[in-house]
Image (cartoon, rainbow, N blue to C red):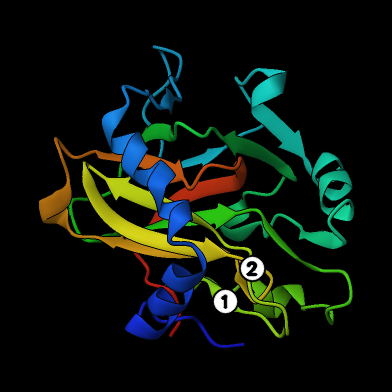
Amino acid sequence: MQPVSFEDGIMARLASLFRVAFLPMTLLCVLPLRSETIVLKEDRPIPASLGFGEELDAEEIVTWYELEKIAAAENRIVLSDCGTAGLQDNIARWIPETGLEFTLRPQSNRRVFLYLDFVGMIDQDMEAIADEQRCRPARRETILPSAKPGPYEWVEVFVNGKRKLITYQGHDVGFTGPIAVPVSRDEFRAGLIHVRIVPSGRLLALWDVFLSHSPPEE
């Protein structure tokens, strides 16, 4: 499997299939919708990582078993929580249609990578992907060996108000492991990183998120 580059080819392909689908993204910029914000307890320091099994209401989280039932209805299977950086509980956080916001603190004032482990799904008839291979962090989503294109969903990732990433999921492209977003120290605000994740409309989910000063293996 090779990481997908963000080149004009795939953008033209997606745009031709989903010209109408970009309308909701425009509306999100106009309508006064507010993202949900993860608020930590006052006595808890701002972390460098987030798992989502604690301090959240039941309707905000989803388990691997529940995701499997949703995927089965679409003849797909769920790729389990990778457990990168020691974060593995197979409990994910729903990303609301209006977006999700949270704040992280890097361990030092130098370039850092924001790792986002989105919940990925593949077709049931697709050959299994070994965890060692699929969980290797990358800078882009993964091309999948499927003859069926789309339908595509996408997620925008903003760091301190700046859009840093748009990543896609469909039958032939998707999330298999953590995606790394580089953040320079010039982009920090008061030593913090404020993250906002906005989906294309349909609810998506996130296993966990963490910061590391180590880049993904190329």
Q: Is residue 135 above or below residue 108?
A: below
State which quadrant residue 19 falls in: bottom left
Residue 55 pos. (x, y %): 60, 19
Q: Is residue 162 above or below residue 39?
A: below
Q: CA distance from mark 1 to mark 2?
A: 7 Å
The residue under label 1 is 142
Lower position in the chain sequence, tag 1 or tag 2: 1
Task: Give the residue displayed 28% in from the left and 37% down from the top.
Answer: 29
- Kindly identify the amino acid type of the residue bearing the numbered disc 1: Thr
Residue 169 pos. (x, y %): 58, 63
The quadrant in which the C terminus is found is bottom left
Q: Is residue 104 in view from this perspective?
A: no
Left or right of 53 on screen, residue 41: left
The residue under label 2 is 176
Left or right of 167 on screen, residue 64: right
Task: Give the residue displayed 14% in from the left and 35% down from the top.
Answer: 190
Which residue is farthest top?
42
- Kindly identify the amino acid type of the residue bearing the numbered disc 2: Thr
